[in-house]
Every structure is written in C-alpha cells, then in structure tokens.
Amino acid sequence: MPIGAVEIKVNVVGGDLEKASHEFGLAPGAGRRGSVYFCEDVSEVLSPSTPLLDSGVLLRARDFPGDDSDSTVKLRPCRMSQLAGDWLGAAHGNGWKYKVEADWSGPRKVLAASCTAERPDGRIAAVRSGAKPIESLFGPDQERFLLDCAAIRVNLRALTLLPPIAATRWEPFDVEGLSVVAERWAVGDRLDFLELSIRVPAAEAAGAQRAFERLVRDHGIGMEPAQETKTRRVIEYLVTSAGGG
C-alpha cells in the first residue's frame, strides 16, 4: 500500500507563541475552542508510566462545540506490516474513517494509521461522570482495528480517561502557497504550545518540509529544537500529574 500523504509539523512554544499568533492572524476569538482527551493505562499504586504511548497506541476523544464529538484509535509509530487483513487498504466504513499517512516532525519521520468515528453528543461527559464506561468512547470497528493491528493487547475497560486539554483550532490558512493548519493546546499554566502543520503528497514532502520550516523561520518564529510531539508531552505530563506512584 503506497503512502499517499505526509503530514508535516512544527511546534512553537514559549515566547514565540505570541509572535506566531500575530504573524499568522491566530486571534483567540477566531478559533474554535474545545477539549481533547487521551486514555492511558494508569494505576495509583504504580510508578507513573505511559505503556500505551510507549507501544505506539494513542486513544483520543475530542469535543468541540458546534462539531460532532469523535474518537480516534491511532497507531504511531507503526509498521505497514502491522496492518492486518483489510486494514492495509481500508478507507472508511459505517460511521468511521481510516487513513494511513506519514508523520514528519523535524528529523522524526514515522508512519501513522488511524481510525476515527463520531460519537454521540454527551458521550465524553457521561464517561467523565461515570455514567458510561470508558470503552463506550470507541465503536466496534475501532476496537477491531485495535485488536487486529496494535502491537500490544489493550483492555479498554481497564484504562483511565486523563484530564482535558484545552484546545483551539483555526480554519486552514494559505501562506506562500502552503495551506497551514494551526492548533494550540494548553494544560493549566504548565503547558502551552502551538502546532503548525501542512499535508502534502508523499512525492512533494521533502521539498515541502524545507519550504515550510523556512517560512516559519522567515516570519521570525523559533521552532522547538527537539520537535517532540505535542501528544507525548501532554500525556506524560497528565499521567505524572495524576499521581501514579
């Protein structure tokens, strides 16, 4: 199965956040605000750890007012040979969408496969309150994808829904021929960063990454040197803050 698209990302943090917001017109009131949640295998009697994240399994739920809530099972990094059966060529099904693409952030270039499904309104709130079990965040086809393709076995009902991340998303905007997506995540006053990304055909990815990073630099915006994914940083922080150990 050829990789059709590459998502190229850069992270902006610290003093460059406001610079980027000004340069690209990312006014807080112009973005859509919502909440992002992740699930992890957390125990109060064990040292903080992220076994799902470390095994390339990301379980996410999102709730943006005005949009349908959704959940995603993502394998990142993954191997093409992990994608068993019809998952090697699937695209969508009854109520779910599936994609396989490369994920580039600086020198880090990995494969990601994800299955996303809409969830009923109020489902995330019901799980948070205990009225619904955590496995109800995911549909049967997402569970099948997890069972068929994940590198580890995952019992959804044994997981913990981590506290919410405050997220702001803006409509894509064009800069020098590139269609840029911006999303800002914040957790209290401890974590705050902006991810800028573009999605391009695989054949154009190398040149597009150079052009994208040059564009950011030319606007006087510093990129985080490590370019660690925002997802890893947030999950590790939330798990540690949850007091495991």
Image (cartoon, rainbow, N blue to C red):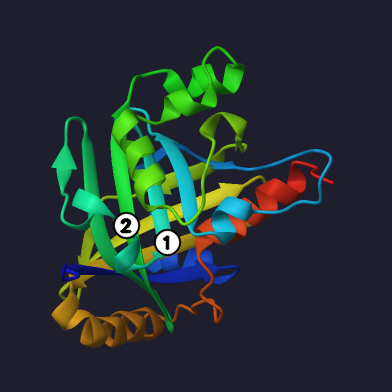
Relative to the observer, which residue lies in front, 52 or 35? Answer: 52
Q: Disc 1 vs disc 2: Cβ atoms closer than 8 Å? A: yes
**Left or right placement of residue 76 versus residue 172 in this view:** right
| Picture coordinates of residue 205, whole percent (x, y) | 22, 80
* Residue type highlighted by circle 1: Arg
Residue at point 45%, 42% (across, down): 60
Mark 1 vs mark 2: which is more N-terminal? Answer: 1
| Picture coordinates of residue 172, whole percent (x, y) | 24, 56
Residue at point 29%, 35% (across, down): 141
Within 10 angstroms of label 2, few (less than 14), some, or many (20 or more) residues?
A: many
- Residue at the limit of the structure toward the top, as seen here: 131
Residue at point 50%, 79% (across, down): 222
Return the mark for residue 76.
Answer: 1
Q: Residue under circle 2?
A: 113
- Which quadrant of the view contains residue 224? bottom right
* Total residue callouts: 2
Q: Give the vertical position of 167 relative to 205 (above or below).
A: above
* Residue type highlighted by circle 2: Ala
**Left or right placement of residue 192 versus residue 223 in this view:** right
